[in-house]
Amino acid sequence: MRIHDGNMVMQDRRGFHNNKSKIVPEAIRSLIRTHINSYPTQISHYKRAIGDPLQPFLHHTLNIATMLRTFKTENMYLPGISTCDWIYRDEFRKTGLKFQSVRSDTCKRCDELYIRLMDCNNQDETNEVIRETENHHVTAESAYKNMANDFQRARNEENFVCLAVDLQQILFSPTLRHSDVFYKRQFGSYNLCIYDARTDDGTMLFWTEIDGGRGADEIISCIQKYVLQNFNLLQNNEERTLVVWSDRCKGQNNNFPMLVEYLTLICKR
């Protein structure tokens, strides 16, 4: 209750006037939405297990500050554009878009299917690519599930050993950012991680390009050294199962020399 012009007013009329200087014109919001939607998005199958499988992601090199700066540059002559930061962030939040996390290793098949999907000319082609994508995702998720089951089995059974092997992206040194480095050859180092599911420990085997490359011979040497140093030879009537999970890189893991290495380990017991 308040007094207005000598009369008692029972209803609160605050906010019903037309003097609202902070109201954002719908044209500005529409322009912001158009700008946000102009960025290409991609559905990442690495995020399917933890959320919406159709969740669109923006490229990991983007962020809201970069997009806002671009929007201001493209529309610098619009009135009030310099103070539209909160409006842009509010409209971005409403879209539900997210930024994809940085990955140094992506799925080649997923990228191929995504390019085909963007190039479809009719609904039948689109449906066919979507079907292939879903089948690929189901296969990938099945493999991850099997690996998780092997990890759990290794923790429960003493004579079941499950290892996961992966080579990190090449580590270049020195890590400088100026333009001259782009034209110079940097020193490369390699780091192979071997994860033991039973002990939940990861072992890093590190070498440089002076010691060797990153082919099958180097990976075989690392696996052989790790197995011989961390596991005792089997005694009579003793059994042990070894399962090794890795990617299907032909030059490192998925090749005949690696099969011969595993046969050698079996012969050495």
Image (cartoon, rainbow, N blue to C red):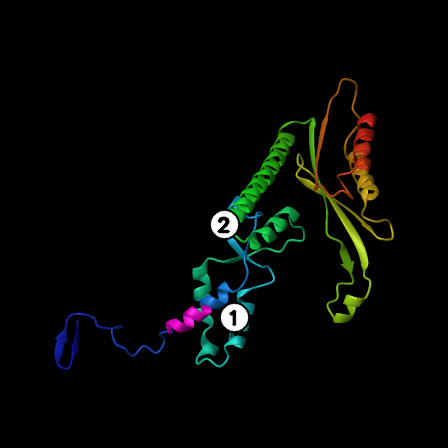
Question: Residue 7: x, y in percent?
Answer: 12, 78
Q: Give the residue pinned by disc 2.
A: 123
Specify whether 190 is left or right of 69.
right
When asked about the image quadrant of residue 178, the answer is bottom right
Which segment did they paint magenta? 25-32
**Is residue 27 rendered magenta in the image?**
yes
Q: Nearer the viewer, residue 78 or 159?
A: 78
Question: Residue 129: x, y in percent?
Answer: 56, 46
Image quarter hosting the C terminus: top right
**What residue sits 46% from the left and 80% below the top?**
78
Asked if the residue at tag 2 contacts the one at tag 1, i.e. Cβ–Cβ closer than 8 Å, the answer is no
Q: Nearer the viewer, mark 1 or mark 2?
A: 2
**What residue sits 81% from the left and 66% below the top?**
184
Q: Nearer the viewer, residue 89 or 35?
A: 35
Q: Is residue 125 above or below residue 30?
A: above
Query: Three-letter amino acid code at disc 1?
Result: Leu
Question: Residue 50: x, y in percent?
Answer: 52, 46
When asked about the image quadrant of residue 259, the answer is top right
Image quarter hosting the N terminus: bottom left
Q: Which comes before the other along the chain, label 1 or label 2? A: 1
Q: Give the residue pinned by disc 1.
A: 68
**What residue sits 35% from the left and 74% below the top?**
23
Q: Is residue 161 above or below residue 22?
A: above
> Magenta part mainly helix, strand or loop?
helix
